[in-house]
Image (tube, rainbow, N blue to C red):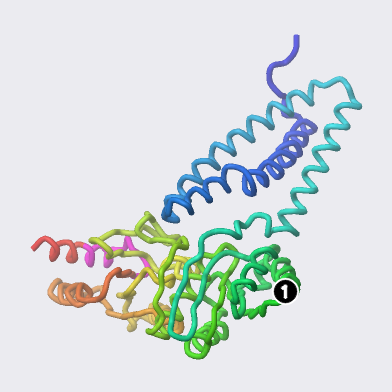
Amino acid sequence: MRQKFIKFTVPNTLLFVFTGLSLVFPLGLLTLTVGPVRMISDYADSHHWTQEHESSIEKIFLVFFFIFIVLLTYYVTHKLARCQNQNFKTGLLCFFGVLLLVSVYIFSFKPELLINSSAISHVDHSSDAEFHFGPYPDEAKLKQLKDENYTAVISLLHRMVIPAEPILMEKERENAKNAGIKLISIPMLPWIVKNDSSVARIKEIAKTFKGKYYVHCYLGKDRANVFRNIIEKENTNILSTSELGIHNIKTLKAFERGTIFNLQKDVYYTPYPTDEEFFGYVLNGRIASVVNIMDPHVNEEKARIDTETKIMKEYNQAFYNLPMGENDGEAKIEALVRSIQKLKKPIVIHAYNSESENSKKFMAVYQKLLHQ
């Protein structure tokens, strides 16, 4: 009698893992480049979906894709474990091995295939310069930009973002040379630290550049949006329209350090953001005012306040430290809340811990004043 289920001995477990990797990489590659994920992305662009809507649909699909891969892996492993034809079994495993190697090679050394370089960009105009924002441009896109009389391409890719970006940077350098278009590299890391020189250069660009520029990072989102936010606030003559996806805090339930509370429309109470959360959700141009209510008289909190003050100034983000002490009475907290409510929205208010007793006290007073 044939067994209905696999016995997960060591050989069968190794076979299951190898088969799974051999299926998930090539099928994942097809899914990302020409399959459902790319189709969802193209449809989202053409119908002006928000980034959050697009991301939610893609996540649902990827959950089903993962379930499908697990079931398919189990089925193929079961068939291979029962196969008596050793030549066929060896040949199929070799074929799987080739698929795995080719797909890993593409993921590692041909990452531009994963990018939709024809995605919709947005345009910022000023009297002297205009900045178009989009994803990584392939060779055809660079030739198109040259034909459309772009002055230069500004790349925000960074060699420390491995393995994809060093490879993409070299390819773009060669492709730009072949297309005859100038390439300006302003490397930015996709988090707030160690970008000082790049931010300073972007501020210089906002004041001095003339012409027509295409600006990109990897997928045309976080770093490109931060770039856009800096130049707009550095040069008020720049006007912008945007069709690029931007991370929006209103769709989030939590940051890494705790829960996000929506106190009222466009007012959010959060824990202290991580570097990545600052970059993706606070410094992308969607937030008008950032308020830190931590107390500078507490040494640990003072260090964070000083760091954040420097970051907000560097990235041209409106920032206020309006401290609330643990022993502050209701009248003092009410005055604090009223001063915050006068600020330009959207507003992000944060302490270090959004669920601490001090935070709960602040939010209770905020809600009380809203309903008076």
Tag 1 residue: 173
Instruction: Give the residue drawn at x 57%, y 64%.
Output: 135
Task: Tell me where residue 321 appears, x and y as whole percent.
Answer: 31, 80
What residue type is disc 1 on? Arg
Instruction: Give the residue drawn at x 48%, y 73%.
Output: 226
Instruction: Give the residue drawn at x 61%, y 74%.
Output: 155
Q: Is residue 274 left or right of residue 78?
A: left
Q: Is residue 133 left or right of residue 234?
A: right
Instruction: Give the residue drawn at x 58%, y 38%.
Output: 65
Q: How many marks?
A: 1
> Would you say residue 353 sits in the magenta stretch?
yes
Image height check: is 120 above or below 177?
A: above
Image height check: is 308 above or below 117?
A: below
Task: Tell me where residue 313 appears, x and y as whole percent.
Answer: 41, 84
Q: Residue furthest left?
A: 372
**Residue 142 falls in image quadrant:** bottom right
Task: Tell me where residue 196 appears, x and y as whole percent.
Answer: 54, 84
Q: Residue furthest top?
A: 1
Q: What's drawn in magenta, residue-wise?
A: 351-363
Q: Is residue 196 left or right of residue 253?
A: right
Name the one closer to the observer, 196 or 350: 196
Q: Is residue 298 left or right of residue 185?
A: left
Circle 1 crowding by C-alpha within 10 Å: few under 14, some 14–19, many from 20: some
